[in-house]
Image (cartoon, helix red, strand yellow):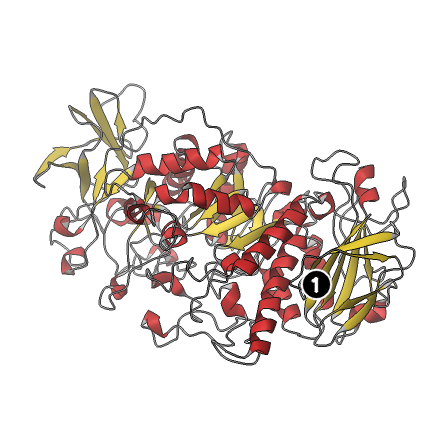
Amino acid sequence: MSSTTGPPPPGPRWDGAATCFSVFSSVAERLELCLFDAAGREERVDLERNGDIWSTRVVGVGPGQRYGFRATGPGRCDAAKLLVDPYAGAISGALTWGDELLAPGVDSAAHVPRSVVANPFFDWEGSRPPRVPWTETVIYEAHVKGLTMTHPQVPVHERGTYRALHHPAVIEHLKALGVTTVELLPVHHFVSEQHLAPLELTNYWGYNTLGFFAPHADYAVGGDGDQVGEFKGMVRELHRAGLEVVLDVVYNHTAEGGHRGPTLSLRGLDDAAYYRFEDGDPARPVNWSGTGNTLNVDHPAALRLVLDSMRHWVTEAHVDGFRFDLATVLAREHGRFDRGAAFFDAIYQDPVLSQVKLIAEPWDVGPDGYQVGGFPPGWSEWNGRYRDTVRDLWRGRPGTVPGFAASLAGSADLFGQRGRGPTASVNFVTAHDGFTLADLYSYDHKHNDANGEGNRDGTDDNRSWNCGVEGPSGDPAVASLRARQRRNQLATLFLAQGVPMLLAGDELGNGQGGNNNAYCQDNALGWLDWDEADEQLTRFTTRVAEFRATHAVLRRDRWATGHPDPGTGAVDMAWYSPAGTSMSEHEWRDPDVHAVSVLLDHRALASGAPSAGGSTGGSAGGSAGGSAAGSGAGAGEEGSSVLLVFNAGDSRLLCRIPPGARPLRWRKVIDTAEHSERVRRYRSGDRLRLEAFSVAALVGE
């Protein structure tokens, strides 16, 4: 297909009368389009080359057409292998494992899914993205299927689907929790790994992508063929409810695995362009992802694939942002992480992608792979240090208070440089990978035997505490302590500066039997258990989320100084010992200190005074990085100061409300050691009884 204006962009494009198919390969000697009819019969059409783009236009072919490619040439170009179009808008059928996928020269078509020409038309009915400011954002990390598979109010035939996700009962639950942004585990079309088949397990989480443009077909009520429209319908209805949709995307590797893996798509088109190899040796793939292959975004074709995919999901499916799995892989140039990488530059100048939420998982398994705090302005990051620090604090580890204070204040020491603010930190204590909150206080050790790997998979660095008994316990004292610890973590999450991320099910008390790597458990172990939901814990989560939403001092967007405000004399963030005195240098350094209070003075917030860079907990002045200006709230809005008191020790304390603290009158509205929601009132200088392992939040009157 010749053109005087250059080759068409990659991907299938239907113009109403015909479909143009276009694909990249710099090494193929011949490329064929394979069209499949309803009976599975294959018709082949040669593509014409224009530079490194191969294309053809086929009249009479439109949405619903099944197709694939076959490439002839050097390396992994093998005409016997049917290839999925990397730009396919939908994918149909299952991948079935067999020697045909691996053996050169053996036809694989019977085992490979088909690419599908997707219908580009959809009625958005006037819905618009909510565009929630970062300061107001509360993220809920959820699995499309697992969230609703046991939900009693969702019709059985809809459970586990895109449609179930916007059922009124689900939306009501999310809104009650104060959720603004649903972060979905991978929905790009994915397949299961070969080693899971004989174990009768499947890839449940979805971190094994086959198609970067196609929504996963198994999540559609109507089955294969309806996934595009149902995904868009989900986004439309969540937007109508004021909820954003962020996608967890896996651009660091693909389902083709290591060099002995199957030839399914990119590998058969241009192995060296799309993947990284040591010294160009195809038998030595770079493995920064830990999965045997790494996408080569140094190459223009691979970088274009990633950026085109992102734009597709924003412009065509209206998603609100992305969470990047192993994001440091995408920012490596010449093998090293580079905050000035081409990937960052391309997004920064893109008028579409620069306007959506960008969240990094800021680590991979390559050299210098842990890069928390290293991403450029405009990015937020999963704060792994927050997770580790607060877990250590609440399991009673010595010397954790300074790090805890810094984390509670937004981690200015990590994110306070290069023009970033507290919302660069996405705070979480649990995520899909690791223990759930319920398991965090029920198990000291992982119990992953169901995964079929001899309990060798999954991390051993859980920083958990079983509260004295491994696994389920009928001891009322153990049950009470576990329940309080779960409330402590939820309170800490919602009371911290930064962006809170709640793992779906933590508010229900959902557990996984101590499995900290349930990636292959597409069953009751991996799904949320709505039937056994802890309603008391759900109510508490709702209360503390509402508390955050109604107090601007908890949602600041600039770093604190810990110094008096020039206009009011108020200190934006001041730290106190249980005695009610400012934390001394000795107290910050004392490893046996397990309790601390912090006063967030609304007067400094309301003044709107600018602040310098943040300071961290443990400084001689006893201040910690927080923020001094609000989240868009005008002066006097949400105008209450807040005093937070933390006791992570194993003994009851009498903590003095700082004498002279303004205002002089306080009311306690949250106490993780009390089931009662009764409000208690105090004056500055009064003593507050705080049980072992508990949190209290007081509001100034």
In the drawing, does residue 368 fall left or right of residue 38? Answer: right
Asked which quadrant contains residue 446, the reply is: bottom left
Tell me if mark 1 has few (under 14), some (14-19) or many (20+) residues whose alpha carbon lies within 10 angstroms of its own.
many
Q: Position of residue 367 (x, y in %)?
A: 50, 62
* Residue identified by numbered label 1: 695
Front residue of 411/446: it is 446
Q: Nearer the viewer, residue 162 or 196?
A: 162
Q: How many marks?
A: 1
Name the quadrant containing residue 398: bottom right
Which amino acid, mark 1? Val
Q: Residue at x 62, y 67 (%)?
A: 484
The answer to whether residue 406 shows anywhere in this view is yes
Q: Is 679 on the left or on the right of 230, as rendered?
A: right
Position of 208 compared to 622: left or right? left
User: What element does badge 1 sit on?
Assistant: strand
Image quadrant containing the N terminus: top left
Compared across the picture, whether 36 is left or right of 691 comes to left
Answer yes or no: is residue 374 visible: no
Residue 321, above or below 141: above
Q: Residue at x 39, y 64 (%)?
A: 518
Nearer to me, 507 or 439: 507
543 vs 62: above or below: below
Image location (x, y in percent) of residue 64: 20, 33
Residue 675 at what x, y percent from top left? 64, 63
Percent position of residue 66, x then y: 18, 37
- Quadrant in the picture for residue 476: bottom right
